[in-house]
Image (cartoon, rainbow, N blue to C red):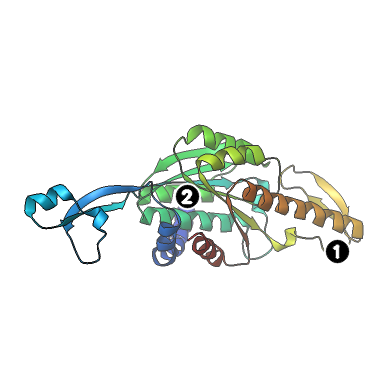
Amino acid sequence: MDTKEILKKVRKIEIKTRRLSDHIFSGEYHTSFKGRGMTFSEVRQYQYGDDVRAIDWNVTARYNEPFVKVFEEERELTMMLMVDISGSESFGTKNQLKRDMITEIAATLAFSATQNNDKIGLLLFSDQIELFIPPKKGKSHVLRIIRELIEFESKSKKTDLSQALKYLSSVLKKKAIVFLISDFMVKDYEHTLKIASKRHDVTGIRVFDQREESIPNIGIVNMIDAETGETILVDTTSKKVRMDYEKYYRENVNYFKDIFSKCGAGTISSRVDESYVTKLLGYFKARN
C-alpha cells in the first residue's frame, strides 16, 4: 500500500470515527471513566441550594457575605489501546476483516479520549511486542496511531496475550484506561490480567467472525492455520470434527468472559457484521 492510499484510508477512518466520537461517545466516555479526583478551582458567592459544607469561612469573614469553594474534576487520564495484530485478525467472511473493525473501534475510542483532553498510547502485539507508542495528546498523535493500525505489518503471526499484558504492567506505572482488543482465541493469560487489572481499568473487546463459531458441512477441505501457516485436510462431513471445533471455540470464549469477570475487568463482544457502535454505547451506559 503506497503512502497516498494509506493517507486516504486514514482520512476515511478519521471522518467516520471522529463523527461518532464527537456526537455519541465523548459524553458517555467522560462519565464512564472518571478523573483522579477533585481539585480546587475558585470561590464564588453562595447561591441558594449550595452545600453549606463548601462555604469558605475565611473569604466569607473577609467580605462579610457567604462564599463557597468550587471544585472541578481533575480530568486528565491516560488511555492505552492494546491491539492484537496476529495472523487470525486478518480473517473475515463478510464485508470486512476483523482487523478493519478493530481499527475503527480503536480510532473511535482514541478520538473520544482526545475530546476529553486525555492522553492516548498504542501497543501492537502478536506473540511479541510489535510496536509501542507512549501516551500523548493531540490530533496528530491520534492520526499517527490510526496510520500504524492500518499499515503496520506484524513480524509474527502467533498470539501471546500474557506477554502483552506483562509488558503493559512494566511500562505503565500510573493508572490508565486500557482497551485490549483481540479475538481472544488463546488461553493462559489469567495471571498477567489479574496483575494489570489491579492497577488499571481494563476492558477486553472481543472481535469475531460468525464463521469462526462453527464449521459448516462442506466436504473434505484444506484449511490453513492463520497463525502457524500449517495446512491441514479437514473432513467437515464428520459430526465429531464439527462438534470438537465448536467445543474448542466455546471454551476460548467462556475463558475470556470468566477470566475477565474474575479479575474485575469489563468485556465487550462484537461480530464483524454487527454494530460496534451499539456495543460500545451499551457498555458505557451500563458502567454509568
Q: Residue at x 16, y 56 (%)?
A: 67
Q: Is residue 156 visible?
A: no
Measured as percent of width and height from the top left, residue 47 is found at 19, 64
Most foreground residue, 35 or 270: 35
Q: Please say if 237 is above or below 148.
A: below
Measured as percent of width and height from the top left, residue 97 is found at 63, 58
Q: Badge 1 local density, few (<14 within 10 Å), some, or many (20+)?
A: few
Q: Earlier in the sequence, mark 1 or mark 2?
A: 2
Q: Is residue 152 left or right of residue 56?
A: right
Q: Residue at x 81, y 54 (%)?
A: 247
Q: Is residue 176 left or right of residue 245?
A: left
Q: Residue at x 85, y 54 (%)?
A: 244
Q: Please say if 156 is above or below 239.
A: above
Most foreground residue, 5 or 143: 143
Residue placed under numbered mark 2 in the picture:
147
Residue placed under numbered mark 1 in the picture:
218
Q: Is residue 7 left or right of residue 232?
A: left
Most foreground residue, 271 or 259: 259
Residue 50, by quadrant, is bottom left
Measured as percent of width and height from the top left, residue 196 is found at 55, 40
> Alpha-carbon distance for marks 1 and 2?
38 Å
Q: Amino acid at mark 1?
A: Ile
Q: Badge 2 local density, few (<14 within 10 Å), some, or many (20+)?
A: some
Q: Is residue 118 left or right of residue 185?
A: left
Residue 99, by quadrant, is bottom right
Q: Amino acid at mark 2?
A: Arg
Q: Circle 1 — which element?
A: loop
Q: Is residue 44 visible?
A: yes
